[in-house]
Amino acid sequence: MVTLFLVLSLLTVLSALCVVFTRNLIYSVLSLIVCFFAIAGHYVLLKASFLAVIQVIVYAGAIMVLFLFMLMLMNLNKKAEASKPFSLKVVAVGVCLLVLVALVSIVFLSAPRVCFAPLAPVSGSVSALGPLLFNEYAIPFELTSILFLSAVAGVVMIGSYGKKAKKQ
């Protein structure tokens, strides 16, 4: 079990680094899909099968397909991309490091001030989460479906805009 956790953790970190450092956007998106599958593997190890299935269906399936469609419809290439000066890259790395130091210091130096009551343990199975999802969280569930529908409509609009511009 520990070995599988370490392998999944290594795969998650390596694929996340590939997302950040890969220059080709398609390879970056594919690395993000691998990262999502590795996170789903972590959910399986935690015995949260429902979250693992949702991770694969929603993120690795639907969201990443939308990302791939968006990238393909935008038709990005090296000639259209403006070159950034080296000084701007150095400043960006410096700002990122400052933010990282600030976040790490906040996490390690702050003490929890609010004591929360422990939650009742909930099983990660579908039979336990189904009634909770459709009874107590029905409105957020429906709002999420509207969000996905608007994302699909946005992708269709981006795609049709490019076709109209080429006709004129």
Image (cartoon, rainbow, N blue to C red):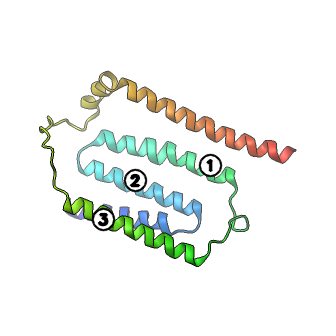
Which quadrant does the C terminus fall into?
top right
> What is the three-letter code of the residue carrying label 1?
Met
User: In the displayed image of the protein, which residue is found farthest to the bottom?
Assistant: 86
From the image, tell me which residue sits under label 1.
Answer: 70
User: Residue 90: x and y, percent?
Assistant: 51, 76
From the image, tell me which residue sits under label 2.
Answer: 37
Specify the quadrant of the image occupied by residue 83.
bottom right
Residue 7 shows which numbered tag? 3
Q: Nearer the viewer, residue 68 or 160?
A: 160
Q: Looking at the image, is mark 3 or mark 1 earlier in the sequence?
A: 3
Specify the quadrant of the image occupied by residue 89.
bottom right
**Residue drawn 40% across the image and 29% down it:** 141
**How many C-alpha atoms fall within 10 Å of the one at disc 2: few (<14), some, or many (≥20)?**
many
User: Residue 118: x and y, percent?
Assistant: 12, 39
Which quadrant does the N terminus fall into?
bottom left
**How many C-alpha atoms fall within 10 Å of the one at disc 1: few (<14), some, or many (≥20)?**
some
User: Residue 28: x and y, percent?
Assistant: 53, 62
**Residue drawn 26% across the image and 60% down it:** 106
